[in-house]
Amino acid sequence: MNVEALLLSLRLALCVAAILLVIGVPLAYWLAYSRWRWKFLLEAIVALPLVLPPTVLGFYMLLAMGPRGALGRLWYAAFGHGLAFTFAGLVIASVLYSLPFAVQPLIASFETVDRKLLDASSVLGAGRMRTFRRIILPLSLPGIITALVLSFAHTLGEFGVVLMVGGNLAGVTRTVSIDIYDRAQSLDYADANRTALLLLVISFVVLSAVYGVNRRAGHRAWASWPVK
Amino acid sequence: MASEVSSATVAARVRKVHPGNAATFFLLDVQMEVPSGISILFGPSGAGKSSLLDCIAGLAQPDAGRIAIDSGVVFDSEKGLNVQPQQRQIAYVFQALALFPHMTVEANVAYGLPHAPERERNERVSEILKMFRVEQFRHRKPREISGGEQQRVALARSLVTEPRVLLLDEPLTGLDTELKNSIIEDLRAWNAAHKIPVLYVTHSREEVDALGERVIAMEHGKIISEGTPREVLDAPRRRRLAQAAGFENLLSGTVLDLREPDGVMRVRLADATCEIEVPLGHAAPGDRVRIAIRAGDILLATEPPRALSARNILEGKIASIEHRGTLVVARVDCGVVFTVHVTPGAERALQLAVEKKVWLVLKTHSCHFVEG
Amino acid sequence: MRFPLRSLILLCALAVFRPAEAAHNIRVAAAADLKFALDELGMRYEKQSGSKIAVSYGSSGNFLAQIQNGAPFDVFLSADIEYPRKLEAAGLAEPGTLYAYALGRIVIWMPADTRVDLSKLGWKALLDPDIQKIAIGNPEHAPYGRAAVAALRNAGIYEQVRAKLVYGENIAQAAQFVASGNAQAGILALSLAISPPMREGKRWDIPTNMHPPIEQAAVILRNAKDKDGARAFLIFLKSAEARKILESYGFSVPASAKSQ
């Protein structure tokens, strides 16, 4: 059983979930409240990773990270080495891959906040930041938790993208899904099974915990508000 | 803590197109000046009252116009000026209240005072909570208190910020009369001390009577009448307003002739031989008109009355009798069906029953000529 | 009522049992590195025999697992002789049909625009600081990867370049890493290095004595539907014509038809 690969996957999933929270919230806020007529195009772009095969996404990432790609050139200029085959490369690719899993629950959550509450907040003198911090955020907590968990879980199970850009370096890019695949390729099915089972158990526990908490949080945040 | 008595006004000239289907489309086009004190915006739903309030508050933007609070212009389409709601210092209590469900009553009320130093904030919050009699709920969440208490909290939350204008959109619907009156009392008391313009939207006649200093009647996006409650509501000039104002009888008729020296005109009620005398109005013989009569203004007799001052006595038969609490609603067919309200005592004394022959007595001045 | 029913049954039976066709239809599972070679071999064979060949390219390891679980192939052309041997041992292959059809060759490959003088430096080229990443197949399960590591050890530079190594899932992916520029050099299969997309690059052939032989073997599968067709194809593979084609694509062919 490859503990190193498992820890690597957990680290990757945590990084990606955190980053997606930071970039996902402003993006989701804009998509939820903007009235730009071409907004639907951006929504479609954000949803693309849902339908693109991960290997396709990975392939284009590989090209983008190369010396001819925009991303690759930038990275090389900044750090003096390539982006592919690094943990950072995995993080960037995974962020793209899991983007809709973070952004969509966030948008849904923001949209369920009663607009009248936002109006009331404005009239009472609160600017957009304050309204966001004190009204939207607390009332969207279930959605934020969902976004975090989905990005975490989705990244944990990621295979295709990592396969394309990872290079299978132990401790750096050999995530647990790659490791399981390797074991299977080497016909070491027993070990593959053990690791896969552990991954399954961890994922199940994480998801159950979050959905359980969400149920209770949902009760608090969405207490039926009597509308006259 | 009494602040200076302000003599603020709100002057608004607003024009806004409301797209919608054939039924809901209207053009909001008003010009008004609201002095300090309570002004009622009265009218049926869809008249544009809430929309006007949204424009004054800055939550909606008029297509054209100018809105000024005291001498401060908050909206001017010609100059491209549109002050954000945050800066307008307006209090707005929505119909749905919009109390923040995840905050306590105290936090809700304190929300509009983030910049005040803590001690002052606490003082002001406590004071207004006491004034509106919800101090004991300060640590509860909105869902844990009753409807009436929520209303008071909503009012307190808006008023603690010492706004220049108070806008209220049907704030008391759904509450029972006693509760309404008590809240209205508190509001009056507050306003007596602060004297800011208060625009109170309602479609309830009771509230108009309870509150009314000034009534502005709106329909279909336009102001159709302004003045005291008596002036605006008791002599309705529009059919829908009449319905809103509680005239149970709206009858079509044709003007027969005018009797100017007497100040009356005779009207034949449609499809019938009934003729009644109504106060002289702007009409010519042959015009089709509508006459509004309150059910409570009609007298019922079981014998032909004699020597009465009333000019309109109509013979008919009781078509139905309905009991609504302490009110007896009788529908009487005189060729035209009238709705008449009597007390249960009267019903018993006169032994009213369906098919019974009765006479209706209508005072000339109880018949109101309604346009449209 | 029974008369029409009988005809119906007869019709169904006829539909199911088609008369034996003169031409065959064989399904081949082939290692990824055979892509170009097998495309041509397949075309030739189809023209000659009138049979149809359907090839699935992929990782030999994957095919092994799929065949073990009943995948409907007739012939398995593996990149590693170990897999057909395993199938034989498990009784999933037709006995006596194991055939080492080619020997793989490896090369050092760099893109054409590299500043490193590969032809002059040979192995030393991999030590150049410009070469930050070297792509090879995964030595844990790809025979080309194993051979690459063995050759690096034999060349005495394995420890020095170890940190630079990145592993492709199969040799084709390793090629992808270098071709896209993310790795500056790679140890690839000769068959891939001379294929059209990679032909323009710089290459340095690694002597075959620097690594254990990369034996690529084929086998006919036990539950092949068309054993006759499969056999005919294998015979073609052993023919002089086929061997010439294989050589032209960078594979060495064993001198005599080896089996077992």
Image: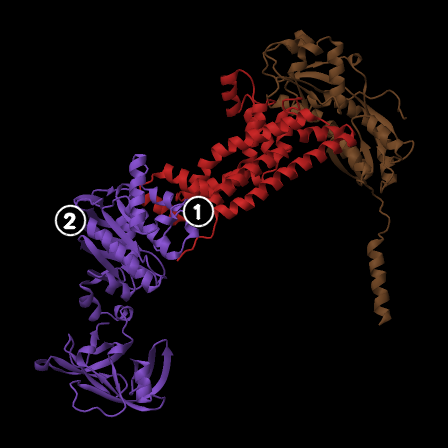
Chain colours: A red, B purple, C brown
Residue positioned 85% across, 32% down in the render: C87
Q: Percent from the top left, x then y, of residue B290?
A: 24, 76
Which residue position holds label 1? A113
Relative vertical location of residue C234 with respect to residue B189 in this rendering, above or below: above
To which residue does mark 2 refer?
A: B7
Quarter occupied by the C terminus of chain C: top right
Label 1: few (<14), some (14–19) or many (≥20) C-alpha neighbours in 10 Å? some
Task: Say what amino acid the circle numbered 1 marks.
Answer: Val
Q: Is residue B66 above or below residue A16?
A: below
From the viewer's perspective, is residue C89 above or below residue B316?
above
Chain hosting mark 1: A
- Quarter the N terminus of chain C occupies: bottom right
Q: Secondary structure at mark 2?
A: loop
- Does residue C192 appear to the left or right of B158 in the view shown? right
| Left-right relation of C151 to C87 | left
Residue A162 seen in the current view: yes
Amino acid type for the residue under numbered disc 2: Ser
Same subunit, labels 1 and 2: the answer reads no
Q: Residue at x 70, y 34 (%)?
A: A198
The answer to which quarter of the image holds residue B234 is bottom left
Q: Quadrant of residue B168?
A: bottom left
Instruction: Identify the subunit bearing mark 2.
Output: B
